[in-house]
Amino acid sequence: MNRREFLKGAGLGILGMAASGAMAKAATAVLPKPNVKKSTVWFTRDISPEGLLKAYSKINAGIGGKVAIKWHSGEPHGPNIIPRDMVMALQKSIPDSNLVETNVYYASPRQTTQGHRETLKTNKWDFCTVDIMDEDGAVMIPVKGGKHFKEMSVGKHMLDYDSMVVLTHFKGHAMGGFGGSMKNIAIGCADGVIGKKMIHGASWEFSGARFMENMAESAKATADYFKNKIVYINVLRNMSVDCDCAGVSAAPPKARDIGILASTDILAIDKASVDMVYALPEEESRDLKERIESREGLRQLSYMKELGMGNDNYELAEI
């Protein structure tokens, strides 16, 4: 090949490369942007019976039949539990609904059904039927895709319900870092004799990331059982670093009351709740953040995502 032929061939090659590059650039330019799906988390600043009912109205389309309202009854005279008038308003608005709970694993009046019922009277939760779901024992339900459990033991009565409304006081937690919707059904639907022992360990040996994963797998069992007939409400009020299981010994809240969140997506609502706490001024958020991070509580969120329990990409829709 002489010099002229070489230059001619090289020129054609360069033109070809340029054309290919232009075509690739043009193709890239017309590609549509990926559609990133976001879950909706409804938000109201109105922490009142009216605000709670408005939030619930945004997510209640799939709720029907016999309805379980899973809330936290709290220890006697607990100062931070969701106000009685709010819980009553929600229960009265949902036909064929009961408040539901399970007995606890730690030393407490609520460790037995009899003691639990006495606490319900003390805290004035006896305005409607309260179903202690493990009063007549427990039943195993499957954990799909879990690496620690293949099944979870829950209160036997849970299977009597067609739908579940998860009404949660969002706050800190001594072991979980924070207690949101996931913790509410993870610990709160597991029975007090078998299920809670599975999650915590026989000698309370599980902590940190492993405890968060145990909770998430337990919660997944309940969420999968109800499928699209379970919804979530988090009340961000009186957010002590301690759970309502601490009763009158709970640390005083330092964070302001924020509002009520509602969603059909358990991961989205707990992620949004954590994000709202982290967005508070440092002097308000410091204690809660320390509690969450010292317990590896954010593993709740990442493991729920790994289990396919929801979407951590959300949008707030203010009511």
Image (spheres, grey):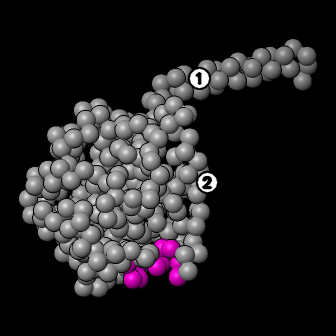
Residue 103 vs 312, above or below: the answer is: below
Is 316 a magenta residue? no
**Residue drawn at the location 54% of the way across and 27% of the way down:** 28
| x and y percentages locating residue 25 in the rendered image | 59, 23
Judge from the rendering whether residue 107 lies leftward or rightward of residue 41; answer left or right.
right
- Where the C terminus falls, by quadrant? top left
**Can residue 120 be seen?**
yes
Query: How packed is label 1: few (under 14 Cα within 10 Å), some, or many (20 or more)?
Result: few
Q: Which numbered marker is on residue 294?
A: 2
Using the numbered discs, state the Cα–Cα distance from disc 2 to disc 1 in whole angstroms. 48 Å
Q: Nearer the viewer, residue 130 or 156?
A: 130
Three-letter code, disc 1: Lys
| x and y percentages locating residue 137 in the rendered image | 29, 85
Q: Residue furthest left?
A: 95
**In the structure shown, which secondary structural element does the residue marked by tag 1 occupy?**
helix
The magenta-colored residue range is 191-202
Q: Nearer the viewer, mark 2 or mark 1?
A: 2
The numbered mark, 2 or 1, whose residue comes first in the sequence reads: 1
Residue 76 vs 102, above or below: the answer is: above
Q: Residue furthest top?
A: 4
Q: Nearer the viewer, residue 29 or 151?
A: 151
Q: Nearer the viewer, residue 126 or 157?
A: 126
**In the structure shown, which secondary structural element does the residue marked by tag 2 occupy?**
helix
**Can residue 38 be seen?**
no
**Residue drawn at the location 33% of the way across and 48% of the way down:** 234
Q: Are marks 2 and 1 in contact (CB under 8 Å)?
A: no
Query: How packed is label 2: few (under 14 Cα within 10 Å), some, or many (20 or more)?
Result: some
| x and y percentages locating residue 231 in the rendered image | 27, 54
- Where the N terminus falls, by quadrant? top right
Q: Which numbered marker is on residue 25?
A: 1
| x and y percentages locating residue 224 in the rendered image | 33, 66
- Say which quarter of the image contains residue 35: top left
